[in-house]
Image (tube, helix red, strand yellow):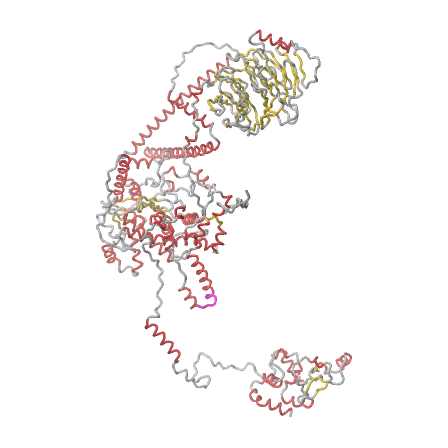
Amino acid sequence: MGGLQKKKYESGSATNYISRNKARKKLSLSLADFRRLCILKGIYPHEPKHKKKVNKGSTAQKTFYLLKDIRFLLHEPIVGKFREYKIFVRKLRKAYGKGEWGGVEKLRENKPAYKLDHIVKERYPTFVDALRDVDDALSMCFLFSTFARTGKCHVETIQLCRRLSVEWMNYIVASRSLRKIFLSIKGIYYQAEVLGQTITWLVPYQFAHDHPTDVDYRVMATFTEFYTTLLGFVNFRLYQTLNLVYPPKLDGKGETELRAEFEEDYAMDSESYLEKLSALSASLARVISSAEDEEAELDHFPVEGDDMEKMEAREKAQQEQDRQKKLFEGLKFFLNREVPRESLAFVLRCFGAQVSWDKSLCIGSTYDVTDETVTHHIVDRPSLDKQYMNRYYIQPQWVYDSVNAKMLLPVEDYFLGVTLPPHLSPFVEEKDGDYVPPERLKLLALQRGERPEQDEEEDEEEDEEEEEDDDDDNDDGEEEEEEAEEEVKLKNMEEKRTQGKAVSAKVTPGKAKQENRQRLEQEEKAEEKRLAIMMMKKKDKYLYDKIMFGKKRKVREANKMAAKRKALDEASKSDRKKKLKK
Amino acid sequence: EDLSGFSRICSPQRGKLDKTAGTSSIEIMDVELGYSLQPVSLIALLPHAHFLLHSLSPSSCLAMCSQDIRNTVGNIPMEWYKDYPHIGYDLDGKKIFKPIRTKDELDEFLDKMENPDYWRTVHNKMTGTDLRLSDEQVDLVHRLQQGKFGDVNFNEYEPAIDFFSSEVMIHPVTNRPEDKRSFIPSLIEKEKVGKLVHAIKMGWIKPRRPKETAPKYYDLWAQEDLNTVLGRHKMHIPAPKMRLPGHEESYNPPPEYLLTEEEKLAWEQQDPEDRRVSFLPQKYSCLRAVPAFSRFIHERFERCLDLYLCPRQRKMRVNVNPEDLIPKLPKPKDLQPFPTTQSLVYRGHTSLVRSISVSPSGQWLVSGSDDCTVRFWEVSTARCLKTVEVSGAVKSVAWSPNPAVCLVAISYGETIVLLNPGLGDKFICSATDQLISSYEEPEESKEQSVQWTIAEGSDHEHGQRLILKHPKAVRQVTWHGKGDYLACVMPDDNSSLQVVIHQVSKRRTQNPFRKSKGMVQCVSFHPIRPYFFVATQRYVRVYNLIKQELTKKLMANCKWISSMAVHPGGDNVICGSYDCRLAWFDLDLSTKPYKMLRHHKKALRGVAYHKHYPLFASGSDDGSVIVCHGMVYNDLLQNPLIVPVKVLKGHTITHDLGVLDVAFHPSQPWVFSSGADGTVRLFT
């Protein structure tokens, strides 16, 4: 045999990973720079499969990076820029200290800057990759665009974020790719389908933020730096796919209209342009002014069997989507001043509606309250003084619920001052055994095209059903009771017998016990299963128990929800009855 | 000559320095010592009072000139002249001799005492002479010491004339005419400007372009090259997307999603990490009323942290159908017969029934209980035929497996009683009695650890035939398959006398083991071969009785064995343990259990094999008897098949004890179980 003895931890997984500190030393970067580099380059720690092996026998908590990743970072030109920046800061400080103001100015002019274009390209070699990862970028940009310009981050960043988010919204409007909206207590979730990718982003409500102290804004700023670059390129490409001009321009018609009205109000043209864009009330200019709706229709291929079914399903989905895209087409909305203008304008424009608001509220309103052709007036206050006859006064939730339901919901439930029906999350997909709130069931029925009956009737029906259920339960109970009774009798007899007393031998006509064959079979099967579970291996048993525990918990939670709902409904019903009696 | 030289030096300066007489003394001094001294500051000179000698106004100087001797050696340490008669050289280069008389201490002291001018006498090192300072000089010294100007007449606070004030004067401060270069343009500058102008004209110098701050975007993915998709992109683990919100996050959720008061309280008391939802669901009547979410920035920040700090790992999600995990076993229906229902209950005992045994014919059942009775039952009718009272709690009963005799071994306390119940065939009973009475004492009687006595009197009438007195409490008795040998267990931690084997026909007792190997729990004979199984707490040892050696040691993998049974084929053993396990050993396979069953919830107390059917049963403290199908194949390659077929329940749990013993009927697929509730039950 012979040969050198193999040393431990010199090959295999121990050499594939590197701890964070070692990586930092290898790159000779400060922790802050290392962090920035990791964020920009998208390098993240990996959890090794065998942590102890990688950690050379120790079980201490440590984060590990792939050695390959760190080697990859070694050749990053940005690292050099970081060092330059460090030097720049030092020089600047020195100049300040010496009071060389000319020097300071000169230094500031030559501040080292870097570009992240190549990193974006490197991280996302194809456009679809970039789109897939754009969720976080959007959420971040929308958040930063709402920041006050008070020094938490650079004003330019905030402006850029605002610009990018407006561009994005304009694209979504132009491409009509919004699918779902959800008003949560955190903010408004939007979901769009862009080039086959589902993209969800969250926009906070329009309020000033109270900035928390335990948040490191430098980290957020670094992320934003990358995200703005990414989003800019994504926007450019998206505008290109729709033949829109980038940076976006309002198309001639809209522009002239707007200009005529607001020229004198806004001095700064460049700033007002962004505002005009963010008003979302006019369509964008195209590179080639072509026929607008030129949608690719699905080609028909001769197919058979399963494919045929799939094809049909796809066609159906496509049709449904087209219908959804034109949901609000032909409707004319007017927004009252208390409703969230931007969100509603965005949503309504996405589905083809015309929308306007009070002239004093925001730039870009296209018609007045007095316009007779307005069909829907969105109001979020209990009552309104002056009402027009020929329009619906509805609360904003109607718009969102209609979009989620992919149909125009009956407006009655959303009139002024009416208690709103619950707003449900469109992202929940119910599986078997999950709890489904009754509102959702009603909605599903509506979507299927069933006419909703009067509420009260339904309630009554439900009651009947419930009663029936109770009956069933009673039946079961009775049987059990019978058995129990018999057993008691037998026991008494036995006792008497054992005590040596003469039992009055009395023959009573026995009842023919009906054997429920199905039930017996079921019981048998259940017992078989129980016995088989006994023979499981320990490992399997553990896994099985875990799965069953999860399942049971789910069922328990669903039952709990249902019970809660039932109790609440009953309480409200009794309240209603009391009121009626009074 | 001297003087004239001095005045010559002084005179040109006098006029000039008149104005600032205060500094005159210094100036003069400098001039005078010019050749020997570097200019030194006045303060530093102050202690060297002898210089003051020269800092007098010229008039006083003249008076002293007659005795003035100038030393020209300069500013050198005067010690150098210590050994010489002279002290230096005068202006003419002649030696200056030291004064002849040198003062000693006493002279000094006398001088101090007597001379009234001693305080103003100064020693001149350069000439070695003493000098008496005049009043003027003393005054000067005082003034200088106080930091005043030397000249009394000098006014240091004269009104200052501000030349460089804000007021523009009509005359220049100096009367000097302007330089010519101040009004002729500079040629060098002209040349420089000319060069710059030329460079600008030629376009070499361009004005600074304003920096572009706005980023430029272009079509980054214009050429999507698949070659740029590197291996690292394939290895990349994308971060999971944010969880999509459910109904409970709505601003207006269905009412059941809102938390009740208790749930809210529980939510608040939970650790933020343990909460299933990170926020409290809220309901607002209208969109207008929805406030800002206070943790919005926090959550985004946490997401950022997750993205760059959270270690990622690709995990395969096990999508297991739980049904697939259940082993596929033959249906119990196909494995019949096995006991399925409780058919008879044998009541009569008032305390827990520790042990039961069935007669080899299968007609009778004996049970021993803690109420100090042994009861004999008819199996088919549950009638108690006979009750024998003994003087202690019955620990174990065992019916002799020999069908030709009718003997039951009963152990209580330290005694084993061999009892003839007198049931069944009269001939057999009498034959048994005869067999016992026909015993003849051997000639040489050995000293035995166990005392054999013949029961007499009332005991004999009750059926007792032989009484064996042991030194320790007996826990278990068991018969050999032939019915002649009887093994009993006297558990004790470290005694060699834990197991004894009795031979009934010869009334002889043997102690097979010389050494203790731990506390013996139970023992059993091999049904066919001369092997003997001894179960200690953790191991089962198999001894060859003929060769008198240990053949096997079975590791039970459990904490404490409670019971053991040997398969009638002899190659398989089951062990029940107090830690809820049942171990099936295949002796041909391994010394480790072939199968471990954890089907009982509580400690196992009794296990038993059926003689003919492939069945075994285990009774446990959870009050159930589990009957399993345990098929042993003759083919050595095929492992035994073990399928649980029935869970029999009937015993009530009293004092945390359920079933204490199980026994099978010798011919039918019936199982008896005795419990802590004082009953024996038959399941058929």
Quadrant (top left, top right, bottom left, bottom right) of the N terminus of chain B: bottom right
Between B194 and B456, the one lying in front of the other is: B194
Query: Residue A459 location, x and y as percent?
Result: 32, 32
Q: Main secondary structure of the magenta part?
A: helix
Residue B20 is left or right of residue A149, and the answer is right
- Is residue B288 visible to the viewer in this orientation of the structure? yes
Between B278 and B327, the one lying in front of the other is: B327
Residue A320 is left or right of residue B285, and the answer is left
What are the residue bounds of the magenta stretch?
A94-100
Between A194 and B327, the one lying in front of the other is: B327
Report if residue A98 lies within the magenta region: yes
Residue B102 is left or right of residue B310, and the answer is right
Residue A76 is left or right of residue A286, and the answer is right
Query: Residue A366 location, x and y as percent?
Result: 25, 52
Query: Residue A158 location, x and y as percent?
Result: 37, 55
Tell me: residue A141, above or below residue B472: below
Query: Residue A11 location, x and y as percent?
Result: 50, 46
